[in-house]
Image (cartoon, rainbow, N blue to C red):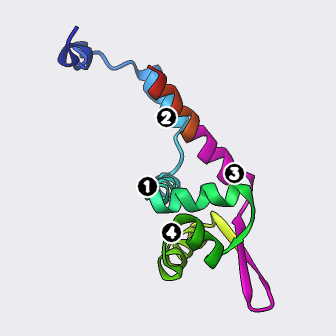
Amino acid sequence: MNINEEFKTCECKNVHQEIVSGAKSTMPDEEVLYDLAELFKVFGDSTRIRILYALFASEMCVCDIANLLNMTDSAISHQLRVLKQARLVKFKKEGKTVFYSLDDDHVSQIFNCGLCHIQELNKK
């Protein structure tokens, strides 16, 4: 079977109304779906993924993350700002040092689910 045969369109012209109605009744509002798409866009940058992965190990300051990822403090600060706006990371100040950590367990759950999916695909 070639790929074009695998993804043929439905030849049936009879809409299965009970299936469509069931799906429609559970579908979130458009605004919620938009916000979800925006969240997933944040995960679409490999630098931000590397920062999140680093924060699994421990909370870190900008210079720790920059050193680990061999990047400038400025580049890391920019990405942390995006992650903070998406509420994926939080920060706390200790004197003049700002430490970043994952915002909550949901961040690691989303990350781990995606990582498991990629690892499963790579086994196929």
Tags 1 and 2 touching, CB below 8 Å:
no
The amino acid sitting under disc 4 is Asn
Which one is earlier in the sequence, the residue at label 3 or at label 1? 1
Front residue of 106 and 78: 78
The quadrant the N terminus occupies is: top left
Q: Is disc 4 surrounded by few (<14), some (14 to 19) or many (20+) residues within 10 Å?
A: few
Q: Regarding mark 1 in the picture, which secondary structure is present there?
A: loop
Which one is earlier in the sequence, the residue at label 4 or at label 1? 1
Q: Which residue is mark 2?
A: 118
Q: Nearer the viewer, mark 3 or mark 4?
A: 4
Position of residue 57 relative to residue 67, above or below, is: above
- Residue 4 falls in which quadrant of the image? top left
Point out the stretch of residues depicted in magenta. Answer: 91-113
Q: Which residue is mark 3?
A: 106
Q: Is residue 25 magenta?
A: no
Which one is earlier in the sequence, the residue at label 1 or at label 2? 1
Q: Is residue 10 left or right of residue 107?
A: left
Q: Is disc 3 surrounded by few (<14), some (14 to 19) or many (20+) residues within 10 Å?
A: few
Q: Which residue is mark 1?
A: 44
Q: Nearer the viewer, mark 4 or mark 2?
A: 4
Q: Position of residue 67 (x, y in %)?
A: 58, 71
Q: Nearer the viewer, mark 4 or mark 1?
A: 4
Tags 3 and 2 touching, CB below 8 Å:
no
